[in-house]
Image (cartoon, grey):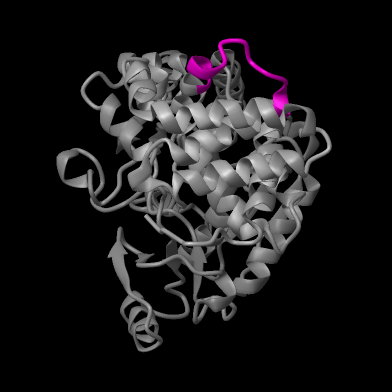
Amino acid sequence: MTTPSVAPVALWQQLQAVAHALAQVRRGVSGTAALAAVPSALRPGVQALLFQVLRQLGRAQALRAQLAPRAPAPLPDALLCSALALAWDEAHAPYEPHTLVNQAVEAAKKTRALQGQANFLNACLRRFLRERDALVLATDQAPQAQWNHPLWWIKLLQKDHPEHWQSILQANNQAAPMTLRVNTQRTTRDALQLRWQAAGMASSPVGQQGLVLGQALAVREIPGFEEGLCSVQDAAAQCAAQGLLSGLRPPTAAGWRVLDACAAPGGKTAHLLELLGPHDQVVALDIDPQRCERIDQNLQRLGLQAQVVAADAAHPQQWWDGQLFDAVLLDAPCTASGIVRRHPDVRWLRRETDVAQLAAIQKNLLNTLWPLVRPGGRLLYCTCSVFKAEGDDQLKTFVGHNTDAQLLPCLGHLRPQTVLTGAALADNLSGDHDGFYYALLEKKLAL
């Protein structure tokens, strides 16, 4: 814990911005969009504080209920919960709890929409400082406070992963490291790691082409990034291109024809191209034209080319030329329940009903894209989710209704893990990675 004798001048401003961002997240705005509205000078500090608030929000909300059973208006409640989330655990507080309380009250006094609530916030937070141990003890038995996830989320994990739900939640509440994928068309992992070592950057290998940085950096500060030698991509996500292409039967004609459906922002598209040859073709599809621009930008940096198409994968009549694909990568829209380490807002944005709604979209995409795969070709279905409805359950239903689909050995459900929890999860990948689901389907050849 840092213990500055004087609070940073901008701390009250940061807390003010955190409260506004949290209020937006509670209204359904993504954390990324909420942070985009923060002035650039404040954004790094605000993001760090907001992420810690989101990882401790269940506890903070339980404490607020003890201090004020009747919830205040959204913005003062957001400021109160932000201060509680940051201050309740002194061992991990970014500043001394008294400093956080003083600066939160200052933020209220200097925010027109909060000035009328400044005395109320001050009273709640001063009481919290006086009675912290008793208040924390009173919330210890509440699952939302203990695990900092919505109750429905906790119950669903208990149902889907009865042996591992606790380790999943523990991993979710840790910050993820920065992981990069080495572009092996241009360099080797050992060579790039040595270059980083010479620049004073510590890293460790993960998976087949990944490197985990000892300390996260802005991408412009990473040697080789602008040259296209590496890309930011979690180790679990790196398994997509590798899993789809490994052992794929050669096409009848020269060169593979590959579809990356739901491709933006292009990390998996780029990885496919890095693994494929010069005569292979990749069609990168995404429904959002602006996100397609991101695909183009990422490919340009890496010196790669794909046919980027802005269209809805669920409506092939709008974009498909009638030629079957040798391989299809379907990274389907999902709850993102496996990447909560990187996006701590997800758990508070999602609703229980989202799981079934997204599973229906995934089912439709599977049924729509499967006819586009040639006999002997493959489709890799993946989601960055740990929920069975978006993984095993989805694929069991699909294979049961499609007799030409053969399920090949694949990773299945990967649970998020840090290096601290990895040793206990023997059936998971080694190292640090997010949660994902992978299923590899091969279309049977006609008899």
The magenta segment is 64-76
Relative placement, left or right, of 310 versus 221 is: right
- Residue 447 appears in the picture as rendered: no
- Residue 256 appears in the picture as rendered: yes
Q: Residue at x 73, y 27 (%)?
A: 117
The part of the image, by quadrant, that contains residue 205 is bottom left
The part of the image, by quadrant, that contains residue 303 is bottom right
Q: Residue at x 30, y 58 (%)?
A: 207
205, 101: nearer the viewer: 101
Q: Residue at x 39, y 80 (%)?
A: 192
Picture quarter with the C terminus: top left
69, 305: nearer the viewer: 69
**Residue 229 higher or lower than 37, as above or below:** below
**Residue 98 higher or lower than 199, as above or below:** above
250, 421: nearer the viewer: 421
Q: Point out residue 101 in the picture as x, y percentages from the top left corner.
A: 55, 41
